[in-house]
Image (spheres, coloured by chain):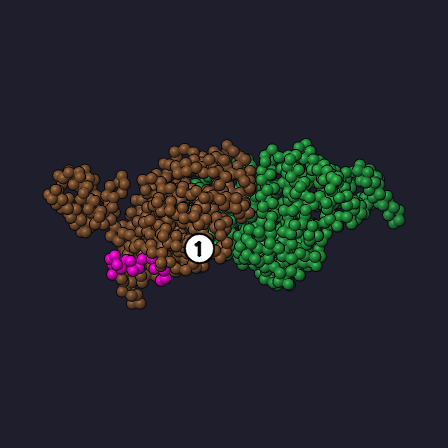
Chain colours: A green, B brown
Amino acid sequence: MSTQLNLYEHLANELGALIHSRVLAPGERLPSIRHLAQQKRLSISTVMQALRLMEDRGLIDAKPQAGYYVRHRARMLAVMTDAEQMAEPAFVGINNLLMRVLKANEDKSIVQLGSAWPPDELLPVKRMQKTVASTARRDPGLLSRVSCYDTNEPEFLRQISRRALDWGQLDPNEIVVTGSCTEAISLCLRAVAKPGDTIAIESATYFVLLQLIESLGMKALEIPTHPKTGPSIDAIEVALNAKLIQACLFVPNANNPLGCIMPEENKKRLADLLTQHNVPLIEDDIYGDLCFTPERPWPVKAYDSSGNVLLCSSFSKAVSPAARVGYVVAGRFAQEVALLKMVSSGATSHFFQAVLADFLNCSSYENQVRKMRRVLAQRIARMSDAVCASFPQDCSVSEPQGGFVLWVQMPAQVDALALHDSAIGQGVAFMPGQLFSASGKYRNYLRLNCGNPWGPEVESAVSKLGELVHRQLDQPGGATPVQSGGIALKQVSGIHLSS
Amino acid sequence: MSTQLNLYEHLANELGALIHSRVLAPGERLPSIRHLAQQKRLSISTVMQALRLMEDRGLIDAKPQAGYYVRHRARMLAVMTDAEQMAEPAFVGINNLLMRVLKANEDKSIVQLGSAWPPDELLPVKRMQKTVASTARRDPGLLSRVSCYDTNEPEFLRQISRRALDWGQLDPNEIVVTGSCTEAISLCLRAVAKPGDTIAIESATYFVLLQLIESLGMKALEIPTHPKTGPSIDAIEVALNAKLIQACLFVPNANNPLGCIMPEENKKRLADLLTQHNVPLIEDDIYGDLCFTPERPWPVKAYDSSGNVLLCSSFSKAVSPAARVGYVVAGRFAQEVALLKMVSSGATSHFFQAVLADFLNCSSYENQVRKMRRVLAQRIARMSDAVCASFPQDCSVSEPQGGFVLWVQMPAQVDALALHDSAIGQGVAFMPGQLFSASGKYRNYLRLNCGNPWGPEVESAVSKLGELVHRQLDQPGGATPVQSGGIALKQVSGIHLSS
């Protein structure tokens, strides 16, 4: 046994040295177990033991069915799950800032690392062209018919229900078809809460969710959110017990911007808490089908026994953002949401419901999301490596488990908004961290869209960003960067409630 | 001169007798002036004098470039323009009632005289099929590309601006593209007012506008509305001076359900008042292109010098309700409306913007609306005649100047909702009057959709409705019908502020 032990420790140390000297670069795939065993003349089980040790040492990550990868140097955002540190509920005020950032993002000549749209080249555009033409030919009524009220395209509803069979059974009467996932969430918020009410959100969270809360005159309570496991259930429980919140609005599968997925046991505990307190959760599952986990994670809705979960999604990230069709499975709020939908915007395109149903009704959709998952995981890894290579050592990046954005933490004295304005000047757009908090947090964070195909243009854009961060830190006014390492990271992490 | 006078009086009396004996039926066209002159051996000017006299006596109506028509017996709703009689601002509460009515309306086996959708057979479906296919072929990017923020299809914006050139010049930066006219109005309401604010509306008005106000927690102030000339400007001025209202929401061109058009001088006076008080008007112009007047009436926006008018419309009534594209020219609120649009539902289908632009960019659209105006005016006349023939004598009907609905006033003791429930039992749907008021008015009114092609099915449906009204009046519990005639009509008109 002791010889065996030495053998695998020896291998682990040897490979570790290669990583430290960057012969094996961050994000790079290790040779296969079989290959290592042959090369080093060791048994398969010895190699596996070595790799497990390296994993424990934080040097590599196992990716299911894909092998082992060199972990990024600054690999994970610091963790905050302490409910004591929650801020007070606050009205949101990001709209003006956001409009300024988005206007800059619209410039076509700029490298778009800002808005998180799926890249055209990954979408099934040719297939959509055919389906649009054939649908128009087959059913002209879809170009005149409309129902403002109850009915939608039955085949579209059937496809949504069919896809949900993996985790449960949907009551078709609970489904309200909307013009987008955003519209679904907007209607849900209006159905479950009123102006002045407080909505629990993840911290950080997607700026459009903050904007929605702002535009409806509601307040946001930021729940401490672990960059791997999502919102702290303990913190949610504290908020529920104190009757601080009237509803939750979470992105449990591949949160934007963190990319984290709530573990199934957390989802179950959350669903039970909601039932117990009779408080609704609006669940944004738009990235659910684009998670990199071996199994498609379930929504919290799967554990909902009381109709308190309103599951919102669309096919805009994986099939076509242009279809403008989303939906919500609205639980006990179905009737109110349906009424608000009718009142606020009327019917949703039956034509594109039929087009999507056609696409969902075969293996095309499964193939499409499989392809996207594979490509997006690769592009995130490339982006992550590039950030680690260009940005100061004491930056850290998220490890997204789905979607296509990367969340980057910079030293505390960096101002992402100032960085943004310089970057726009140099032809690079990104989303500054300030947009992802209701309470002014994440001043030293930024979000990068990793959807674009990797190439010299993107590579140079990331490198420019890195230089700009260095330059901000080197400025006479800029404080000395906080030293790298776990402790420094914790100090500047997203857990602080003001900054 | 006296002989001349006798001659034309004689002719007027002769024709009048034919009308009273129903040899000339309500809605029927009189022989042409030339024909009458030849037949009676009178001069053209004598015949014209006779017809003018008959017009003064309320027996016939001149329709520009179409000749003279026998007036309907009970032809016009009584008038109310007295500002003194305005009710207090009131929260709206029609949603539950409406859902019940709409559910009944969805039954396909029922004759649909309820919801006001344009009939398929009048819409350019074939043309849309072709354009959809060619657009998908020509620009695949429209099936993937999307911009949540600022940009829309430039050609669509250009077409909207081009069509507005008839009455003024639009600033393209004022245009916000939305998923429907309803969504445009909803966003405008949220941009210009907050919960608890009071919105001036026409009385009667379209139930979706009431619902919007209800769903946003705002109050409605019903402005007395003349069935021919629309809302009383005097009443609006009273409300503005008393600072009772924070905004107006009117349908100045072919109000739904009355079909009235505000005279241009009223529009100008209204625009001036709004400027003076800096109060916004949300203008629903969705029926503007479907008015039966020789010239397309201008919107109030044409007279707006202060950016207080937010002009909302779509092509859903004249081209395709299925396109799900509307817009608002939002004046000084453009930025707020654009932000709310982005937040509440994201982008609007670029694909259908392009399809509509293609349709608008040639004579097709003009031909289409010309055809619809002609056919809809005929169908309204048929419906009006059928109502006059089947309903009790002391009913009256509106004289719509556009759109495709007819508003029917029944004796005071008729309950339109009870009537609705019996009618659904007999396979006929309509909209009960209760839905068109924020304050419980119009209990004895109903709205009929006249868009459907005339035929035995519709004819029998109207006849059934008439029978049901008679039956309600004959019931032991039912009071004796109010006697017909001008005075009775005034007593039961839409002017009363509680009923």
Looking at the rendering, the stretch of residues picked out in magenta corresponds to B483-499
Q: Name the residue rendered at 22%, 47% in the picture.
A: B55
Q: Nearer the viewer, residue B429 or B52?
A: B52
Q: Nearer the viewer, residue B157 or A272?
A: B157
The chief SS type of the magenta part is loop
Verify whether residue B497 appears in magenta: yes
Question: Can residue B359 be seen from the camera position used here?
Answer: no
Q: Nearer the viewer, residue B328 or B428?
A: B328
The answer to whether A305 appears left or right of B452 in the picture is right
Kindly state the secondary structure of the residue where label 1 is placed. Answer: loop
Q: Report the residue marked by disc 1.
A: B243
Question: Can residue B412 be seen from the camera position used here?
Answer: yes
The answer to whether A20 appears left or right of B488 in the picture is right
Residue A232 pos. (x, y %): 68, 56
Disc 1 marks a residue whose amino acid type is Lys
Question: Taking B482 as reference, is B42 above or below it?
Answer: above
